Image (cartoon, grey):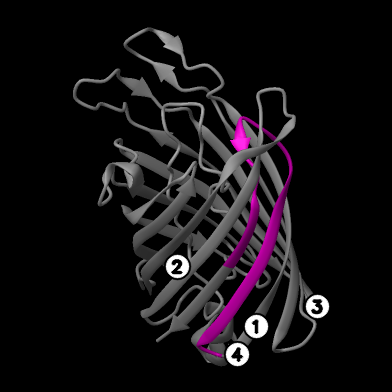
Amino acid sequence: MRLTEQSVWLRALARFSIPGVVLLAAASAAHASDVTLGIIGPHEYDLPVDFKPFNVLVQYGDGNAAGSYYNGSGARTPGEGSHTWSGMTKYVHFRSFDAVPGVGFAFELIQSESFTLANGKNYGGFGPTIVGPAAWFKPNAHSTFGFQTFMETPEGTRDATSPNYWSNISSFIFDYEWKHFSFDGDAGTVVGSTKHIRGQNSYFPGVVFYTNLRWSWKATKLLEPFFALDWQNVTGTYNNTRRSYVKDSSSREVALGVGMMFNIAKNFSFTTRYTHSVEGRNTPESNAYYIKLVYLW
């Protein structure tokens, strides 16, 4: 996409941010209920190439009232979930290079926030910080394909919001645009380092495999309803000290959602969505709502 089409791609970019994730899966039977990168909306990877540098500020927010829990057999068990609220404040710098024509680049700095209410207790604070780059190209004028990779720090402002290990979040990203419809998403993995806490057993966290798919209908210039599918599978957590896997530590979830994107201005958009689990194992259900605000300058 060339600079002569500036008004077109500015509108697309106002809807965009390469998403990060907070991986809070612990070395226990309890896992975070959100699917990795489940925060993304439609046109998340509808990106230009060969453009002047610009910046994006994004605020994500989501709440999950997980009143039930999927046990090891995949049965939905009432009363074993939790209520969680989380957010992400993100700055993204975009640029391209004359020496690498036809390729776009971005670098992100993300700060996460979270609050949990469960079993009569409540706690919250800042979570880990996430940083990393992304690169993409356009196979044709209507499509985008690329790769993103992020490092997540091990510490938050308190133990309850700290994974206590480094992790890498990497995925392939793609987008295809028709006149009245769009389809985009990602597919990737999360790999963590060994978890060490003084005086406790050593653990190797399970590997996460995930995909997030979004189908949207360009109903009007302002309104764009969409459908979301999120899938995640987490392998078992390994106790290095005892040389065995933690019982019921592997998990799986499939969630479906519907939402609406509001393209308010060429440099500002608002997206909202509701999502619910349709299948799972060893994970709280998703009964969640999401919002996303994007501002471009």
Instruction: Give how far apart the Cα atoms at labels 4 and 2 are.
Output: 25 Å
Magenta range is: 266-290
Query: Which numbered disc, 4 or 2, marks the residue that appears first in the sequence?
Result: 2
Q: Return the residue found at the far front.
A: 120
The residue carrying mark 1 is 262
Mark with earlier residue (1, 3): 3
3D distance between C-alphas at marks 4 and 1: 6 Å
User: What percent of the width, then of the height, locates residue 165?
Assistant: 30, 35
Q: Which mark is residue 32?
A: none
Q: Residue furthest top?
A: 243
Provide the residue designation for mark 3. Answer: 180
Determine if residue 207 is in view.
yes
- The answer to which image quadrant residue 185 occupies is bottom right
Percent x, y of residue 101: 44, 69
Residue under numbered circle 2: 104
Residue sitting farthest toward the left:
198
Mark 1 lies on a secondary structure that is strand
- Comparing marks 3 and 2, which lies closer to the viewer? 3
For image coordinates 51% across by 47% down, the residue present is 171
Q: Is residue 56 magenta?
A: no
Amino acid type at image mark 3: His
Q: Earlier in the sequence, mark 2 or mark 1?
A: 2
Residue 282 belongs to magenta span: yes
Q: Please, is residue 20 above or below residue 4 in the view?
A: above
In the rendered view, would you say 171 is above or below 209?
below
Reading the image, the residue beneath label 4 is 264
